[in-house]
Image (cartoon, helix red, strand yellow):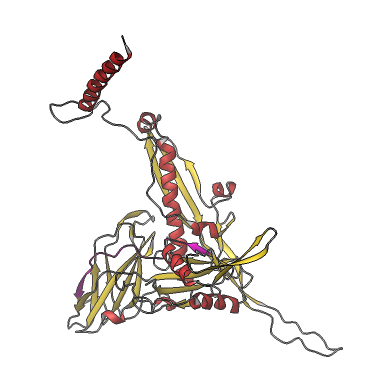
Amino acid sequence: MTTPNLVRQYNKYASANKSNIAKALDSSTGVGEALIPQHLEKVITNTIVRLSPELAMINPVYGAQKFHEFNRVTALPSAGSRMGENAVTPVKNSTYARDSIPLKIMRRKGAVTNFQQDASQDFIDSAAAEMENHLQSHAFDLATEILYGNELADSYGFAGIERLIATNRITGTVGGTVPSNLSFLDDMIDINSEKQGSPHRKAFLMSPKMLSFVSRLLTNVRISQGIVGQGLTQVEIPGGWRMMAYRDVPIIASSAMRPKQQMTTVTMGTSTTGGSLPTATVYHAKVAPITYNGEELASVDAQITTGAGATNKVTLSWTAFVGAVYYKIYMGTSEANMVLKKVIPAFTYDGTGTPTGNVTTTDILSVTAEASVPTHMQTDNPLVATGGVAPETVGLWDLDDFQGLGKFPYTNSGGSKFNGLVTIEPLAKTDDFLPFLIKTYGALCPSFEATSVWQRNIRIA
């Protein structure tokens, strides 16, 4: 057979095969049936883009203990060291306060079936993939608790840096203020330095968008470059410079500092019994969930007027917000003067502390803030977007173990073997399942908060 004939024959069979394959892969009725009705991709793309750089900043400290005890220096030896040559030197000691924090339990359980493991073994290790996904969620839980945890609101959680920073908490203007220069970062560094925090390990926390914004504000960058044989040259960079640090303080781009979503609609009800709110008064309220993104945008304004009873209360209700771990409740007599009244967990618990469901309602009984809101948070207002741009939070986190908030005591021994906070361990096989457990037993240590700064309501435009 000549070469042209071979080509024609090949094209003939190729055309027929192409038609047959197309028909076989079409599962429409009366046309054909898929040759491969189900196929697992060998490469799985994880679309979760949030990382947890916050966990890389803390200093894990292992100890076989249920409570971590520490000494807090409350006063240095008194001033005055001048005296005569033959004087008797007086004793001037520091003063200390003994303190302790209970270590909290964070656990999550997962499982895959042996059938799933066997059926997918040519494409993926199902057990390993599921463990990795659980580990990632556990890391997000841990990072969120480190930043926004509130043990006053949820006894099963521990205090995070937002709840702990009291001395240098800057509320800001409702709707956010747009900085025109980097003086707001300078002010945060100066606050730290005035408390002798200059030599401490520390970092700025801000969203990636805020990092891009402050980088654009730094327009006077000069780089000195050495060129062999030509000495030094200076290069001016008029913007486009992405900062890794500012005044030698590293910048951590955390996606937990900028709202990504808005809380759904909240409804209000009132009762003339059970509380102590004034009669015939209009109240406005908003609810803001705390998720892996941090505090989200608050719900739209809801309002109600109390009745004529002497013991009024207000009840707020909503649909469970996906991903919420806490809720912040804001209320006031107008939309403009709302402040934080209450923080609650997003989950209900039974008597053993086992999560049983979602919290979707809460009562406000008094005009004063509840115990879940410490004094320094009682002037917080809800995060409200301006022109579609969400206000953000920027933090300066002092990571010193003893004069900062950088120590994380933990006691899960498996974590100590791997020099980390998290332990992954297999559980007893149940029926045809391969169960596993991921856990952390620990808490952020509130050694000293006055060298850290928490600034709300900064906006990029």
Q: Position of residue 14 (x, y in %)?
A: 27, 21
Dividing the image into 4 quarters, which one contains the N terminus?
top left
Residue 442 showing in the rendered view: no
Q: Residue furthest top?
A: 1
At x 12%, y 26%, the residue is 30
Vertical comparison of 83 with 161: above or below: below
Vertical comparison of 427 with 11: above or below: below
At x 50%, y 72%, the residue is 219
Q: Main secondary structure of the magenta part?
A: loop
The residue closer to the viewer here, 346 or 450, is 450
The residue closer to the viewer here, 103 or 187, is 187
> Relative to residue 246, is residue 51 drawn left or right?
left
Does the stretch in magenta take in 261? yes
> Relative to residue 219, is residue 316 drawn left or right?
left
Q: State the extent of the magenta-drawn residues as a range.
A: 251-270
Vertical comparison of 375 with 231: above or below: below
- Number of disc labels: 0
Q: Quadrant of residue 173?
A: bottom left
Q: Position of residue 316 (x, y in %)?
A: 24, 70
Q: Position of residue 124 (x, y in %)?
A: 41, 34
Vertical comparison of 392 with 19: above or below: below
Q: Quadrant of residue 392?
A: bottom left
Q: Quadrant of residue 144?
A: bottom left
Dividing the image into 4 quarters, which one contains the C terminus?
bottom left
